[in-house]
Image: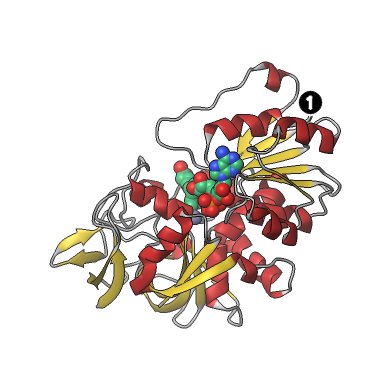
Amino acid sequence: MKTKAAVAFKAGAPLSIETVDLEGPKAGEVLVEIIATGVCHTDAFTLSGDDPEGAFPAILGHEGAGIVRDVGAGVTSVKPGDHVIPLYTPECRECDYCLHPKTNLCQAIRETQGQGLMPDGSSRFSIDGTPILHYMGCSTFSNFTVLPEIALAKVREDAPFDKICYIGCGVTTGVGAVAFDAKVEPGSNVVVFGLGGIGLNVIQGARMVGANKIIGIDLNNDRAEIGRQFGMTDFLNPNECDIMEGIMDLTNGGADYSFECIGNVNTMRQALECCHKGWGESIIIGVAGAGQEISTRPFQLVTGRVWRGSAFGGARGRTDVPKIVDWYMDGKINIDDLITHKMPLEDINKAFDLMHHGESIRSVVEF
Ligand code: NAD
Ligand code: DAO
Ligand code: ZN
Ligand code: ZN
């Protein structure tokens, strides 16, 4: 079949709207009509050329929602008509990682997914016979896409696609890091570095679990108001004060939990070192550029601070994503006010411009 898609032909160039050939689903695969997709910082990171795994030409996008249109042989967990959210972190429920209680990093299709290919080692997308790569196993910047069955969360049918697409990455990454990975306890003091599409979801996750102080850090003062709306109790701008002193004063000695949601190795160090001696835990969510390294004095760890990371919020997608959709539908989390811009696929490059100028929290493309 033919599908309309935004194609990334090379790093640093705008996406190009093309009619692409799409092969139908093979065994274990599913054809999905994408109805809406968010544009995430990670798409921009890959498009910039800084992503060591980034390969071109490719169809980017990993934050979508849509409807199953066809299934390949042997597919049993979804059927045509089902509403689904693609998962860049799949859940096969069989590999060593899925069977281990401490990780969500299913490895069943990791190798081929990292190469931009389906599990059989080939691509379903092409233009004039030239293969176009998949991206993060999702390629949601295409109106129709093919995914492995294990990379689809089936969700309730009354949930709006233009909102729940954000659960495919940003919402789950932020709220999940608090609830599934850090397991923040009620009454904890939490510090969030970077109040973008991820950090604001960390803030609302911290509010949901009953945190005490929720301190937001950002260079952009415009983020203070929306941060407060989502549960932030205090805001610090590093250009206007000594944030480490500010955090110590507000928390009586340091954070119980800090979350780095920028991808900057300097703020990663600050996030660790603002944690309380003896027990404070710092969770890295931000993805730093290729080749960058973090550092601290080891005594920071000897004296009880913990440094760790979180991918896709620690969520096991097929199990947890439908629950997060319920949290949204039950009013426990707010997605609507984080979606600041909407556009058709033809205007997708505007979504990248808005992100780079700090003007959007999330842009959503509707097909
Ligand atoms: P974003 O650009 O929307 O937000 C970043 C925020 O950080 C902005 O508000 C910006 O003003 C602020 N900022 C930048 N430099 C700063 C500094 N030095 N000090 C204080 N504030 C600063 O980005 P996002 O979409 O929220 O993504 C954040 C990071 O999370 C990215 O690195 C992204 O790749 C990563 N990410 C990780 C996962 C995961 O599973 N671990 C998933 C999705 C995204
Ligand atoms: O198992 O090695 C692996 C792959 C883990 C992928 C985790 C991705 C999280 C960070 C990238 C940001 C996604 C939008
Ligand atoms: Zn697995
Ligand atoms: Zn993302």
The answer to which of 111 and 362 lies nearer the viewer is 362
In the image, residue 48 lies at what x, y percent? Answer: 35, 47
In the image, residue 239 lies at what x, y percent? Answer: 63, 38
Ligand 1 lies under 8 Å from the Cβ of mark 1: no
Can residue 285 be seen here? The reply is no
In the image, residue 66 lies at what x, y percent? Answer: 47, 75
User: Does 304 sit left or right of 64 as displayed?
Assistant: right
For image coordinates 66% across by 66% down, the residue present is 323
The answer to which of 324 and 359 lies nearer the viewer is 359
For image coordinates 40% across by 78% down, the residue present is 367
Examine the rendered structure and indicate whether residue 132 appears above or below residue 30.
above
In the image, residue 102 lies at what x, y percent? Answer: 63, 42
Q: Secondary structure at mark 1?
A: loop
The answer to which of 157 and 259 lies nearer the viewer is 259
Quadrant position of residue 60: bottom left
The residue carrying mark 1 is 277
User: Does 183 sit left or right of 28 as displayed?
Assistant: right
Examine the rendered structure and indicate whether residue 176 appears above or below residue 350.
above
The answer to which of 138 and 82 lies nearer the viewer is 138
Quadrant position of residue 139: bottom left
Q: Quadrant of the N terminus?
A: bottom left
Q: Residue flagged by tag 1: what amino acid is it?
A: Lys
Furthest residue in direction left, as rendered = 128
User: Does 255 sit left or right of 292 as displayed?
Assistant: right
For image coordinates 24% across by 56% down, the residue present is 9
